[in-house]
Amino acid sequence: MQAIVAVDEKWGIGKNGALLFHISADLKRFKQLTLGGTVIYGHKTLDTFPGGRPLKGRSNVVLSRDEQLQVPDAVVCHSVAQAAALVAGKADVFVIGGTSIYNAFLPLCETVHVTKVAADGGADCTFPNLDEDPHWAVAEESPAQHENGLTYQYITYQRVAQG
């Protein structure tokens, strides 16, 4: 299992229910990495998608405590264990947010694709700082890139120890 996330320099990921930055190259990379795979995310994240609809070209798994929730073109799960069992053995499974979903699934992930933006987005929700976590190591880094006055880079982290 993998996670994919864009963070600011303080590992912030969102503010007021929205992404911190709009970087079209990063959105294209997200699509390229996840297309054809399975994405796992929370109900609040679903609400931020265009029309509140699941992502096209991917198998969508939505986590929600709402036992009555039904989402066309998605499977709704009500626990981490249920979602993990559903995707067991599948390749290209990506956890895509939000904070509580990342925190719940990070122990199950082997790889995390991070877009690190060199700016403070004033976030009200965060992702765990993998640079300070001994269970994770940088496997790959892109050169710095620039768009919309922002400097960012892609960093791939690999799990080096369980925990």
Image: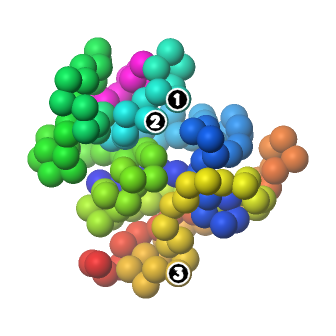
Which residue is farthest bottom? 134
State the image quarter where residue 151 is shown: bottom right
Residue 163: percent from the left, percent from the top?
29, 78
Q: In this view of the protein, can residue 38 be seen by the observer?
A: no
- Mark identifier at residue 45: 2
**Element carrying mark 3:** helix
Q: Amino acid at mark 1?
A: Thr
Residue drawn at (73%, 53%) of the image: 121
Mark 1–mark 2 CB contact (< 8 Å): yes
Residue 56: percent from the left, percent from the top?
41, 21
Q: Amino acid at mark 2?
A: Thr
Task: Please tell me which residue lies in front, 78 or 96.
Answer: 78
Q: Which residues are magenta?
A: 53-61
Q: Amino acid at mark 3?
A: Glu
Select label 3 or label 1 by which is in front.
Answer: 1
Q: Give the dominant element type of the magenta stretch: helix, strand or loop.
A: loop
Residue drawn at (47%, 27%) of the image: 47
- Mark identifier at residue 132: 3
